[in-house]
Image (cartoon, coloured by chain):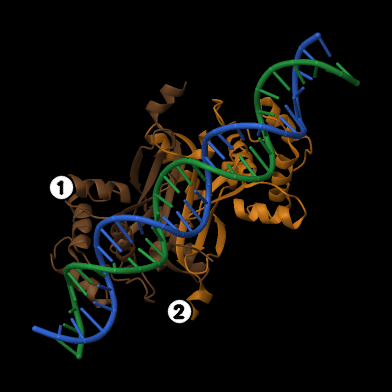
Chain colours: A brown, B orange, C green, D blue
Amino acid sequence: MANLTAFFNCDDRTMEQDPALPSLNQEPELLKTVLNKEGFRFTSQRQKILDLFQSAALGHHLNAEEIHQQLLDQGEKISFSTIYRALHVMVRLGLLQELELAEGRKYYELNTPFMDQHHHLVCVHCGDVKEFEDAKMTQVGSSESASRGFSLLNCQFTVYGICPSCQSLLS
Amino acid sequence: MANLTAFFNCDDRTMEQDPALPSLNQEPELLKTVLNKEGFRFTSQRQKILDLFQSAALGHHLNAEEIHQQLLDQGEKISFSTIYRALHVMVRLGLLQELELAEGRKYYELNTPFMDQHHHLVCVHCGDVKEFEDAKMTQVGSSESASRGFSLLNCQFTVYGICPSCQSLLS
DNA sequence: AAACCTATTGAAAGTCATTTTCGCTATTTA
DNA sequence: TAAATAGCGAAAATGACTTTCAATAGGTTT
């Protein structure tokens, strides 16, 4: 069986990801509402983590280490366990999306409706990540999952290559 | 910087992935040839691991644990370090492809030319993985990498959802 | 075919991102 | 506002890989 922790490991509550994604950017109180609706509690740590994503450029991805560091930089002490737990809860609630950028660690970014979903072009040498959008991806993802009776949660297209500057370094 | 071990961590030899993929399925001696050409040695362990992939259905993916278990089942003792090292070498040589199926571990499968590349539909609940093909993926991957000057290594489209049987379990 | 060089192996120790445990604190709910 | 318990931080644990190192074996040379 799969071990997709961010989807299923928020303690033991059984709950499905909410298909109607709230637009948190506007409502300062919305995080509390969304959490409480599902029996989670609002905490300042969770708000601060979400704030990081909201103040970054849309589509910017962060990992646990970077979140920890950015909070330290702004004078907030927080433990890694809290960060990981908050990330899982927010993925579960559909606020964040978990990304596999093939670097041995997980990245997260604000979840966006399917139509705006973007994908990633990764340089395997320097780790640089470029984002791009292409409606064909979402089409293929939804038609493929529909044809097999899957209910679609999300889809990721990741292209691995070597960026121009690394190409010149390597040659 | 990225930590894509299978691309870059085969000891310290600097070598690029061979763009011309040999079709190993026919030639029993080819593994030795391919290894020796790049200064690697042919060993029975490497052959046995490759055999597992070749005897499985094309596109079947295995992780280190499964390889270890299957070899044990057929009476072969092998260490995990040997398995991981062999996998890295074979990815480096273009014989295998590394997959990120978002389950906290890496999967491998026989590498196929781009035109036959297939993608994955994963049930996040039971972990079941279906394969599918769609030429649009490769098109988008190569045009996107070309437009940014990246040299394309490979691309993976992974769709996450809930399979029909898990849907009925969960409802 | 024996000698030689060094890549590869297995066992065990080490890494590192993430998870869990547990006593204490803070948010909800009654 | 008190009782119930979700969430917190610190530290220990986990698990997938990696590395180390002495012994072995593939490939090459003589």
Q: Nearer the viewer, residue A20 or A41?
A: A41
- Relative depth, front residue between A109 and A13: A13
Q: x and y percent of residue B3 in the render?
A: 44, 39
Q: Distance from label 1 to label 2 (Cα)? A: 42 Å
Q: Quadrant of the N terminus of chain A?
A: bottom right
Q: Residue at x 77, y 54 (%)?
A: B75
Check disc 1 and report the residue beneath it: A74
* Mark 2 element type: helix
Check disc 1: other Cα within 10 Å, few if <14, some if 14-19, many if 20+.
Answer: few
Observer-nearest of D21 and A100: D21
Please, is residue B56 above or below residue A7 in the view?
above
**Position of residue B77 measured from the top left corner of the image (x, y, whole percent):** 73, 49
Find disc 2 in the rendering and name its residue. B170
Q: Amino acid at mark 1?
A: Gln
- Rendered image quadrant of residue D28: top right
Q: Is residue B25 above or below residue A165?
A: below
- Is label 1 on the same chain as label 2? no
User: Image point 74% across, 58% down: which residue?
Assistant: B73
Name the amino acid, label 2: Leu
* Label 1: which secondary element: loop
Residue B134 appearing in the image: no
